Amino acid sequence: MPVRDIYHDAVKKALLKDGWAITHDPLVLKWGLKDLYVDLGAERLLAAEKEGHKIAVEVKSFVGESEVDDLEDAVGQFILYHDILNRTEPDRVLYLAVRQAVYVSVFEEPIGRILLENQRIRLIVFNPQTEVIAKWIP
């Protein structure tokens, strides 16, 4: 099992506060002989629908020496998980969870904006102190 991100519990609590049920902690993806671990799987049932919304959430702290290196690693992992989920659980939507400070310093800058504008990734922006979701970026 991989080591949990330092903000894992904060994101988990934020999802619970936002009405999500945690269904997997972690969500195991099996592909060939490899097992991969997405940090969280969650589901929210809506009264107006028979089926709920399912998400997978990969939490990234961005505490390395270089935000660009952290971004490259996160995007690579996101693409790999996204492509496997498309084949194994096409009804589950993958999100990358980042702190508000990371959103401002990376995703409000041109290097991160291009990823959002081209819809390469989806974000959950959270506040680690209050353990709430500040923004969803589909």
Image (tube, rainbow, N blue to C red):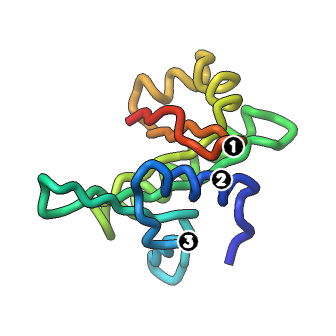
What SS does tag 2 mark?
A: helix
Marks 1 and 2 in Cβ contact (< 8 Å): yes
Judge by depth and name the residue closer to the eye, 48 or 77.
48
Q: Which residue is mark 2?
A: 10
Tag on residue 26? 3
N-terminal of the two: label 3 or label 2? 2
Q: Amino acid at mark 3?
A: Pro
State the residue at coordinates (72%, 41%): 129
State the residue at coordinates (22%, 55%): 46
N-terminal of the two: label 1 or label 2? 2
- Residue extending farthest to the right is 65
Q: Position of residue 38 (x, y in %)?
A: 54, 64
What SS does tag 3 mark?
A: loop
Q: Amino acid at mark 2?
A: Ala
Q: Amino acid at mark 1?
A: Pro
Q: Position of residue 69 (x, y in %)?
A: 74, 39
